[in-house]
Amino acid sequence: MVGALIESYAGPMARVIVIGAGAGGMAAAARLRVKGHDVTLLEQGERYGGKLARYERDGFVFDTGPSLLTLPAVYRDLFLKTGGPLEDAVDIQPLDTAFSYRFSDDTSLELPGTDPGRIAQAMGEQLGGTAAHDWRDLMARAADVWRITRQPFIQSPLDGAGTLLRLGLTTHPSAVRAVAPFTTLRRLGQHHLRDPRQVQILDRYATYQGSDPRRAPAALMTVPYVEQAFGAWHLGGGLATLADALAARCRERGVDMRLGVDVRRITTNSAGVTGVETADGERMAADIVVANTDAEHLYASMVDDPRGRKPLRTLRRATPSLAGFVLMLAVRGRTPGLRHHNVWFPSNYDAEFDAIFDGRPVDDPTIYVCSPDDPRMRPDSDHESWFVLVNAPRHGPIDWDAIRESYADHVLEVMARRGFDVRDRLLWREIRTPADLERGVRTPGGSIYGTSSNGIRAAFLRPANISPVPGLYLVGGSSHPGGGLPLVGISAEIVADSIGRARPSPSA
Ligand SMILES: Cc1cc2nc3c(=O)[nH]c(=O)nc-3n(C[C@H](O)[C@H](O)[C@H](O)COP(=O)(O)OP(=O)(O)OC[C@H]3O[C@@H](n4cnc5c(N)ncnc54)[C@H](O)[C@@H]3O)c2cc1C
């Protein structure tokens, strides 16, 4: 998909070390291996996938990270180019009723999974008024913005003024009008959507980039557009099956994969990277290092090279992304009206963002429940697995270890107030706080997406995939183009294409 990139590395086979086996690390490793490089993947944890993970107990199966796959073309491309179709590797299923929303005035809305036109129609039928017309209008504009930004920005390496030029934002007034670079997502919503419930739905998409809709750019209108135009997808058995498939693909291609290897430092000399050093003191030589670690941690603690200071300074100007508080509930019986993805909004959405970005747990949060009607994810048809996610401030400003149980009780209480009291049907609950995520996958504060998109320049503050330290590349949600499985997959494509194909050896 990153067609316009020039392969900058056309040298002999490189020794590549990928640090971290998240979706981005594995996607980059598989792509680089088929480009002819010698690839070693080092993961500090005891399993592959990073945030893309599952929890299983007594026949209940939960995705503990991503629960919604969008823009599957990114992974279709990856799997095809590394050996075989995605459809042979995972059980990809379109969702017909994708989302069920419930608002504080007790009205609700059920939306199909694909097609902005159908979705607009469903909004019109259920919300009435101008809802269908307004949503159609907004999605038409979002389609334009996607067309303007996809290739020159999202699928290309960040390159300062060059990126702006490619976007046409310095030359084409119509592009500027569509993208509205100085408008926030909230303002865009208020401009296009007369029904405040639709504004709330649009606002929620800012959180898919860990952001506050009152500060995130209007360009995030592309997030619902992509979801609706290219579909909302489930993977049979859970999204973590994608992690299994990525690990299998890397293995089949001959990536040297090692678990339990904690990389402490990236070693450099004046020419660029020379390798890595592990926590056990082992030194491993490399021509190229691809870091799937958190970008701030990378530049602050792993690269002791003056060329890494500038990206660190830039990064520190961005607001960190929000985190998430997760409850996994083993529920007895079936719940009428429960869909695959359920969102129950509070009356005061702004109070939620105020609390999160002030570093306070949210008192009356939006509740998201994912309960797939998937026989592989529950013990039998008389039980349900509920993955409950509440947006939360990062670990650090507050101590999540201290309040994990009391906040879990609170979330169950809020769910009961919203009409979904499962406390007397609960077999057990399992909690994952931002502190757990920080410890598990080394994401500072348990942030879901690295830095947020808060602020008009945020997209340009994210670290570039090609580091100023020669031979160092960044892949994953804390670097360009951002978090979420599709963007992370695109970052792997940018990195692999930037490194390029190894020149066949003369004897080959
Ligand atoms: C609760 C939650 C819900 C989400 N929901 C969705 C969703 O519905 N849809 C969606 O598309 N996205 C969702 N996301 C975001 C998505 O999970 C991430 O954007 C994506 O999985 C991140 O992949 P990554 O490649 O950046 O790496 P990560 O998953 O962050 O993995 C990085 C890996 O590097 C390893 N590592 C770190 N430091 C070192 C070191 N020093 N040495 C060796 N290894 C190291 C870590 O252990 C980890 O395995 C969600 C995330 C969370 C947490």
Image (cartoon, rainbow, N blue to C red):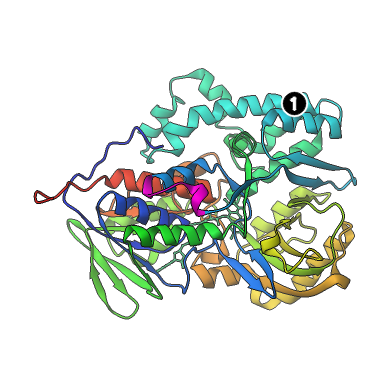
Give the structural element (helix, strand or loop) at label 1: helix
Asked where in the image residue 362 lies, by quadrant, the reply is: bottom right
Asked where in the image residue 236 lies, by quadrant, the reply is: bottom right
Q: Look at the image and tell me whether residue 465 can be seen.
A: no
- Residue 193 is situated, as x and y percent measured from the top left of the image, at 75, 30
Taking 252 as reference, is 15 left or right? left
- Residue 419 is situated, as x and y percent measured from the top left of the image, at 89, 57
Q: Nearer the viewer, residue 400 or 35?
A: 35
Q: Residue furthest front?
A: 88
Q: Residue furthest left?
A: 506
Residue pictured at 71% horizontal, 75% vertical: 403
The N terminus: image quadrant: top left
Q: Main secondary structure of the magenta part?
A: helix
Which residue lies under the disc numbered 1?
Answer: 134
Taking 112 as reference, is 22 left or right? left
- Where are the magenta residues, as a range? 81-89
- Residue 344 is situated, as x and y percent measured from the top left of the image, at 80, 52
Please state which amino acid type lies under the numbered disc 1: Asp
